[in-house]
Image: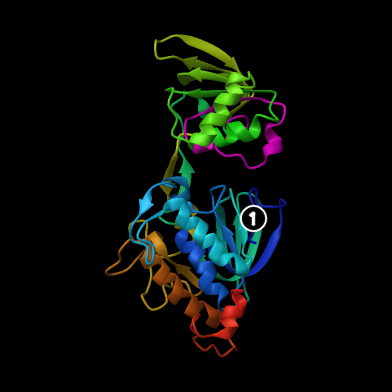
Amino acid sequence: MTETSSNGGATGAVTETDAVIIGAGPCGLFAVFELGLLDISCAVIDILDRPGGQCAELYPEKPIYDIPGYPEISGQGLVDRLMEQIAPFHPTFHLSQMVQSLERLPGGTFRLTTDMDETFVAKVVVIAAGGGSFQPKRPPVPGIEAYEDTSVFYAVRKMEAFRDHDLLIVGGGDSALDWTLNLQPIARSLTLVHRREEFRAAPDSVNKMRALLDAGDIDFRLGQVSELRGDNGQLTGAVIKGKDGSQTEVACTRMLPFFGLTMKLGPVADWGLNLDHNLIPVDTEKFETSERGIYAIGDINTYPGKIKLILCGFHEAALMSQDAVKIVYPDKKVVFQYTTSSSSLQKKLGVI
C-alpha cells in the first residue's frame, strides 16, 4: 500500500528520499513505477487532495481512448490502475500542498519546502506538474479576499479545523458534495448552496446529500453568494441571492467555495530554470532541464516535436529514470532489464 498524507504530515517535517516528484497526475505516478524498478524511492507532492491530477479532478468519468492496452478507460480508472501498479514501491504522498522553494545544497542534493512547512531533501527532482499547479477559482463575491485563509478556504487540509463551526459549502460538483458528506458529522450546522437543483457530482453522493437534507441534518439554498458579513476576516454570515432576486442571510463561520480549478505555473517560474512560454525546455535523451538532476516530464515540458499525450509522458518517464539512476547510484553498474524476463524485477513487483 502507498502511504498518503492528505495534510502534509507534521508541520516542519523533513523527508529524505531519493527522488521528489512534483505532480501526482498519470505521468508523475508512472515515474514512481519506472524509478521504483531501479530501487529509487519517491516522495510525491501535489496541490490537490488526492492523486490523479487532471484525470481525477477534471474528468474522472470521461473515457480516454489512446492509452495502450485499453481501448477505453475512464480518467479515474487510469489513476486507479496506476496506483495499483506503483503500490509495491511504497511511495509517500504529500497532498494539499505546493512546493514553494527549491535550492541545490552544497553536496549536490536538493532541498524543497512547501507551503505546509514540509521540507524534502532529495538527489533528483522530477517536475510532472502538467500545465502547472492547479489553483482554485475565486468566486465573484466582493471583498472575499479579506476572509481567505481565516474563514474562507478553498480546500480542506485538516477536518478538525471545521469542527463545531457553522459551515457554508458552495458548489455542485464532487468536491462540494464529498465535503458536505464528510464534514456534516462534525459541523455545528451545514448549509449547501448551489445555483441550480441539478448537481454534477456522483449520483451516490447526491442521494446521500438529499437523505441528509430530508432528515434535517443539513440545509440547502438555491442561489449564489452575493455578499459576506463579518469583521477582521471572521465570517458571521453570507447573503444568498436567489434566482428571483430575493436575498436571505445564512449564519456561517466557515465557508468552502468549490468553483473549479485553473492552472498556473506557480512558484516553478522562480526556480531558475530556463522557460519557454511558461513551459520547461528539456532534452530528448533524458528529459533533463537546464539544471542537472532536475527533470520535467508530461505537459509541463517542451521540445521539438512535443505532443501532449499521456502516453508520451510515460515514455518520457522511462527515459528520465534511466538517467536519474546515475545520480542516485553513481557507483552502481546498472544493467537494463525487462520486466517480462527479469526475476529480480518480478520480485520487486511481487509477482513471484
- Residue 179, position in %: x, y? 59, 35
Q: Is residue 285 left or right of residue 171?
A: left
Mark 1 residue type: Thr
- Residue 183, position in %: x, y? 65, 33
| Image: 176 above or below 33 | above
Q: Which residue is mark 1?
A: 4
Q: Based on the displayed image, in which of its 4 quarters is residue 161 positioned?
A: top right
Q: Secondary structure at mark 1?
A: strand
Residue 189 in sight? yes
**Around disc 1, counting alpha carbons within 10 Å, would you say few (fewer than 14), some (14 to 19), or many (20 or more)?**
some
- Residue 186, position in %: x, y? 71, 30
* Residue toward you, 276 or 227: 227
Image colouring:
rainbow
- Name the residue: 61% across, 33% down: 181
Q: Based on the displayed image, in which of its 4 quarters is residue 40 positioned?
A: bottom right
- Name the residue: 66% across, 55% down: 118
